[in-house]
Amino acid sequence: MDRTERLLDLVALLLDAHEPVSWAELKESFPEDYGSGSDEATERKFERDKAELLELGIPLTYVQGDEDRKDGYLLDRNAYYLPEPGFTPEEMAVLYAAGSAVLASGAFPGRHDLQHALRKIGFFAGGQLATPRVRMELGAVRESAAVPEHLETLWSAASARKWVELVYASPKRPDPSTRKVDPYGLVLRRGVWSLVGYCHLRQGLRTFHVHRIRSLKMNPSKPRTHDFEVPEDFAIDTHVPHAPWQWGIEPPVEVRLELRGPLASQAGAHFPDARVERSGDRTEVVLTVTLLDALLKHVLALFPQARVTAPESARSRFRALAEAVAAKHGARA
Amino acid sequence: MSDVHERLRRLLFVVPYVARHRGVTVDALAKQLGVSREELLRDLELLTMVGRPPFQPDDFIDLHVENDQVWVDLDQRFSKPPRLTGPEAAALAASAELLRPAAQTALASALGKLEKILPAGAKKMYRELGSAVNARSQAPEALGILTRAVEERRELEFDYAGSGKAAAEKRRVEPAEAFNHRGLWYLHGWDLDRGSERLFRLDRMTGIVLTDRRFSPRSMPPARVPDPAERGEVRVRFTAQSAPYLRERFGGEARELTDGGVEVKVIGDERWLVQWILSFGGEAEVVEPAWAREAVSRAALGALEGTR
């Protein structure tokens, strides 16, 4: 019998049963599948089927019998059926808007799971689902055709806690390297996905841009056994900075910027991790910087709405960068 | 994800769905399930063979296709789909993060209700996997007003700091769509004062007012944010040091130079171009046209003067 068919039959049988179904009964009900062959082989087959059903969220348990009932497998109907979630139209709209925008965008981890989730929460809503008025365009690089597929593999590996082996092409190195990584999580910043995980080669936490992964495979052995556990104190958002000047390359320096015009009123949104100081008409932000050039280049592009006010070392480096651009374009300061 | 897993998940949803939407057409059902018509017909055929042992005629799921419509006799066993799995709920929550904080209140309460209907065994996985994906796009609070304006077809007024102007200008706009492009939020709409369609960056909009003036939507193709990696008239050279990043972004469009650098051709939007070149701090040089070289040199000198 086809495995999908057998599993569905099993669910149908258990959903109907009003008392535990014993192993002997299962063997009798599925003579070709569980009834023939060695005990060991048929039990293993059933264990695999059971694991598959548990993964689908089907609440299958084995109960020890007593005087009133026999031993056997039981499916808790109350725990099986999806209850009405009772979302308000607004809540439903948010979940739908985000979920369908993400599906349309093409590159988001867990797309299959998301599709099933949207269908399930829409089950009770009838045809009243609003079409979302937001759209997501993700991906900031050309050669990113493999990104959706890699995200899907990383999602599966993160949920099954299996290590992955990846071939990584960093722009800083001439040749790609092969790494074994325990995938702890995925972060999206400015349209770029990063993988954060434990790198076996470097023996520490590392961040990888998903679009730089040339090939990727998940450890195929023992799919239901965890290869690793994520440390309790791991927090994904502390590993991928919001801005390139937070990459942790240099010792931290406090840099002060003055913002003018429209940028002044959006100081907090533009520099989310900065301290904003306002006095009178003057708006300043103070940032902790671990890659000074990255910030200065950003400020250069924002000029005259942003300028560096302190420290003097940052101001002089800023002037050097501006001078370099001017010199390249034939200007003499 | 194995094929069996995927198919089983789909089939456990099909029966309750058809029971609720009796006579749904094959095409509509295929679309709802995200599969091809052929795949769905194979699924439905398999379902007619599903039943409970001992497989007497009454033990089968009574499902049939007639005149291209799908019917199922009410089957108590499969009256509702199974609950969400941990990964399903986590994927939903991760995607919803994209709209935070714009939809903070509704989002928080929706996620609370979502967690309540999860099976006990799925909650741990939901929390762990949910926190393994971080996709916050810093959706501005204003997004809520904008999407409402689009839905209710109401004109918007706001101050906009665009096109290199020092001060913000008042705009009156018929909003068509809000969208996120590479992490930035945009509003596409019809600018009533300029009489043309425009693209606005949400982070440059302030003082947004949702008016009571209604409009009938104009037919406009979806907006596109200009992609600098598209061929344009401006030739830019990059040093060997920054070349790997350009190769990554421009792919085959980046032409190799003998000194290890690369040359690309980009579109000539002055404001964008100047900012882009400046952001490389001396690693990039505009080769031609002359107006673009001059614009960059002017901006660089301005920054230099302003930081004496």
Image (spheres, grey):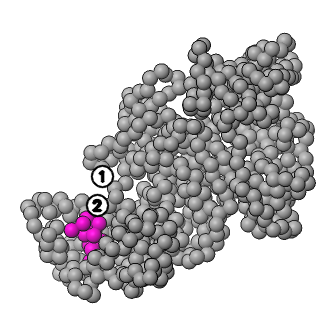
Magenta span: A1-14
The chief SS type of the magenta part is: helix
Q: Is residue B223 above or below residue A308?
A: below
The residue tagged 1 is A224
Q: How crowded is the residue under tag 1: few (<14 C-alpha within 10 Å), some, or many (20+)?
A: few
Picture quarter with the N terminus of chain A: bottom left
Choose between B199 and A163: the one closer to the eye: B199
Q: Are marks 2 and 1 in contact (CB under 8 Å)?
A: yes
Residue under the image location 64 percent in, 18 percent down: B239
Chain of the residue under the numbered disc 2 shown in the image: A
Residue B275 lies in magenta, yes or no? no
The residue tagged 2 is A51
Which amino acid type is shown beneath numbered disc 1? Arg
Q: Is residue A303 above or below residue A135?
A: above
Asked if both marks, 2 and 1, belong to the same chain, the answer given is yes
Q: Quadrant of residue A191?
A: top right
Q: Is residue B1 above or below residue B28?
A: above
- Secondary structure beneath dot 2 equals helix
The picture places residue A183, in percent across and down from the top left corner, at 42, 41
Task: Tell me if A37 is positioned left or right of B77 in this view.
Answer: left
User: Can residue A214 be seen in the rendering of this structure?
Assistant: yes
